[in-house]
């Protein structure tokens, strides 16, 4: 691949972590130069990135020595309508942006791209320029007129000035970047530099797609996967110059930059809806495959685990005396479940902490602490900051991540990738199940390396884990009554979720899915906590979902939750009970009974979560909500 582009790579310094301690909003960015109609490529790319933000969208193309731009508040569909009413001239170089607003209202003026006063330069941006007020007043003093409330606009003006003296867009971008404080991805074009797109990144994602006679820039490979599966991961503080015939990467100082080339192992069809009404429905249905793919190649013929990618040497893993898991949202719930498995199988104390709280309480960390950072996107700022803090204290960090080339695995000591494929729906489903699988693998691997589990025990647990994909498939085949129930509850205001042991994080996950998709008041509780307060919420016909542990094995847990069901039912709750096949003890107390296959207790979340995903998705649809793009949310939360 390097033959086709004329860059040669030299080392760049380790990421500047201090610069990373900034806020970075989401947003999706696309850049294209090649032989195709740039507008078509850019709009198609933005559609794939709309999950990153959908407050406004805009594009700019270079055509016949001039620059043409369009931008519109609201979803991409508004911009497409604008372009149909007022078409732009056709060109083969272009950039685009879809925004999740932080500074400045989501209106037309604040939408990207931002132009200089001559209308020659266009810039799209993801991030916050922290010294923009100072730069803005400097520009105003020199006679520039700034038209928006954004920090981005200063970059287009500075870039126009720098280009007029440097005469080279990449050099102009380097000069501008050296003046910027904050975190940013920038992509720009200049009408005086036809067939060139430049990009820059500091603490915000930007990947290069390497095509044949065409090249791409995007926040995420999904934007260009229909055109190429060859990608280049940019490093920190780098500028990339994109031309048809090649890509040149330099540091902000102009030295050639060090980058990583990689091949994307999924194709465009993975990022399509494939006949489903929503990505979320498709992603729920893909879970058996995602689970199986995450196990693939990690178990040898003798049933032992082979996690070659965990590059932390076995002797280091044997010396670890504490594990701390950091994650956010759904990934945090996966981490809660991992704690049960890790402590049970390895006897190493394990803590789980919200990444956003972690570094502010001065956690006790040292080289014998293993930190596990779980993140689907690999870009969640809270998780990234937590892992940087852990590494500064000398701890090793193992990332569990779904996105190749993202920042979290890049900054970790090792990574175990989940093979869920691209997750497009904002609410996480298949990523969650694969995070669980990866956590179980890590827990068992630690048990194997540290000798806390006998070989035959590991073989048998691995076999049970390998059976789960089939069981998830089985659950998916029985979901019609769950959908019907969800529709019947569409006018309710509140749903509560209860669980015990690993069923407690499942209850939290069920509640989170319902909040974010159905915009309902939904809360998850540890069932044992009921009598300490939450039971006061129970009133007549209040739907309460209860995740029941297996009656086999830890039957004491089962018996306790059966009592909890009776207690809430006696107070009028409508009980929706998720219980394994053959568990007859719960049947008399269930107003609605959802059956799941029998699994070992620790693995039950892999099957018990699925009905809750289906329930939330159907309830949201019944309430007329946007399932794939819930209000106020974006897929990668790159703000702290
Ligand atoms: C909920 C959801 C979020 C994410 C959280 C972490 O459905 O998707 O709670 O789980 O924002 O995101 P990642 O895993 O990308 O770090």
Image: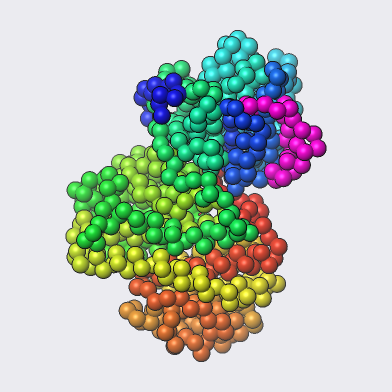
The percent coordinates of residue 386 (x first, y second) are 42, 45
- Over which residues does the magenta segment extend? 68-94
Q: Is residue 466 magenta?
A: no
Image mark count: 0
Please determine whether, in this image, residue 172 is positioned above or below residue 452. above
| Picture quarter with the N terminus | top left
Q: Is residue 260 visible?
A: yes
Q: Is residue 71 magenta?
A: yes
Is residue 38 rendered to the left or right of residue 582? right
The percent coordinates of residue 605 (x first, y second) are 43, 68
Is residue 171 rendered to the left or right of residue 62? left
Residue at left offset 53%, top offset 81%: 593
Residue at left offset 28%, top offset 57%: 299
500 and 138: which is toward the camera: 500
Q: Residue furthest bottom?
A: 588
Is residue 514 rendered to the left or right of residue 551? right
100 and 211: which is toward the camera: 211
- Which quarter of the figure has residue 122? top right
Residue at left offset 38%, top offset 82%: 551
- Which quarter of the figure has residue 262? top left
- Which quarter of the figure has residue 437? bottom left
Q: Residue furthest right?
A: 85
The percent coordinates of residue 105 (x first, y second) are 72, 40
Residue at left offset 34%, top offset 81%: 552
Please determine whether, in this image, residue 571 is positioned above or below residue 4. below
Q: Is residue 331 visible?
A: no
392 and 331: which is toward the camera: 331
The percent coordinates of residue 276 (x first, y second) are 60, 59
């Amino acid at each position: 691949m390097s033959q086709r582009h004329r860059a040669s790579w030299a080392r760049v310094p380790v990421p500047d972590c201090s610069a990373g301690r900034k806020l970075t909003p989401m947003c999706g960015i696309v850049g294209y130069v090649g032989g195709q109609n740039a507008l078509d490529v850019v709009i198609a790319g933005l559609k794939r990135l709309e999950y990153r933000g959908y407050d406004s969208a805009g594009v700019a193309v270079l055509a016949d020595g001039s620059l043409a731009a369009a931008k519109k508040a609201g979803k991409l569909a508004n911009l497409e309508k604008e372009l149909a009413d007022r078409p732009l001239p056709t060109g083969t170089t272009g950039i685009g942006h879809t925004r999740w607003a932080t500074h400045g209202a989501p209106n037309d003026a604040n939408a990207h791209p931002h132009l200089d006063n001559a209308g020659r330069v266009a810039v799209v941006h993801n991030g916050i320029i922290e010294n923009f007020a100072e730069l803005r007043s400097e520009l105003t003093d020199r006679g520039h007129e700034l038209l928006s409330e954004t920090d981005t606009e200063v970059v287009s003006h500075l870039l126009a000035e720098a280009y007029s003296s440097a005469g080279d867009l990449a050099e102009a971008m380097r000069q501008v970047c050296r003046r910027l404080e904050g975190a940013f991805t920038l992509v720009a074009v200049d009408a005086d530099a036809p067939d060139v797109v430049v990009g820059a990144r500091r603490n915000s994602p930007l990947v290069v797609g390497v095509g044949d006679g065409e090249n791409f820039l995007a926040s995420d490979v999904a934007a260009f996967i229909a055109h190429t599966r060859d990608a280049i991961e940019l490093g920190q503080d780098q500028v990339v110059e994109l031309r048809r015939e090649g890509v040149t990467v330099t540091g902000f100082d102009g030295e050639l930059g060090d980058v990583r080339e990689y091949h994307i192992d999924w194709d465009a069809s993975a990022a399509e809806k494939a006949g489903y009404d929503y990505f979320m429905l498709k992603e729920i249905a893909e879970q058996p495959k995602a689970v199986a793919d995450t196990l693939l190649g990690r178990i040898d013929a003798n049933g032992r685990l082979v996690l070659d990618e965990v590059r932390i040497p076995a002797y280091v893993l044997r010396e670890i005396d504490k594990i701390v898991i950091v994650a956010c949202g759904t990934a945090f719930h996966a981490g809660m479940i991992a704690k049960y498995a890790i402590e049970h199988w390895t006897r190493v104390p394990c803590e789980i902490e919200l990444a956003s709280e972690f570094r502010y309480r001065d956690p006790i960390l040292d080289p014998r602490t293993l930190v596990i950072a779980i993140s689907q996107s690999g870009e969640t700022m809270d998780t990234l900051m937590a892992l940087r803090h852990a590494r500064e204290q000398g701890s090793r960090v193992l990332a569990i991540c779904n996105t190749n080339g993202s920042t979290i695995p890049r900054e970790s000591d090792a990574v175990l990738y989940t093979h869920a494929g691209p997750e497009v729906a904002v609410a996480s489903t298949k990523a969650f199940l694969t995070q669980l699988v990866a956590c179980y693998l890590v827990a068992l691997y630690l048990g194997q390396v540290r000798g806390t589990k006998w070989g035959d025990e590991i073989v048998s647990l691995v076999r049970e884990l390998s059976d789960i994909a089939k069981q998830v498939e089985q659950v998916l085949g029985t979901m019609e009554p769950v959908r019907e129930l969800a529709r019947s509850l569409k006018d309710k205001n509140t749903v509560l979720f209860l669980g015990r042991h690993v069923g407690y994080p499942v209850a939290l996950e069920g509640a989170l899915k319902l909040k974010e998709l159905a915009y309902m008041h939904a809360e998850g509780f540890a069932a044992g906590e009921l009598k300490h307060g939450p039971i006061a919420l129970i009133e007549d016909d209040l739907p309460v979902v209860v995740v029941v542990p297996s009656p086999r094995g830890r039957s004491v847990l089962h018996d306790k939750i059966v009592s909890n069901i009776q207690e809430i039912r006696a107070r009028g709750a409508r009980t929706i009970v998720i219980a394994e096949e053959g568990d007859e003890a719960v049947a008399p107390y269930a107003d609605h009974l959802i059956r799941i296959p029998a699994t070992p207790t620790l693995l039950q979340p892999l099957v018990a979560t699925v009905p809750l995903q289906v329930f939330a998705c159907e309830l949201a649809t019944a309430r007329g909500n946007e399932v794939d793009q819930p209000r106020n949310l974006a897929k990668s939360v790159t703000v702290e």
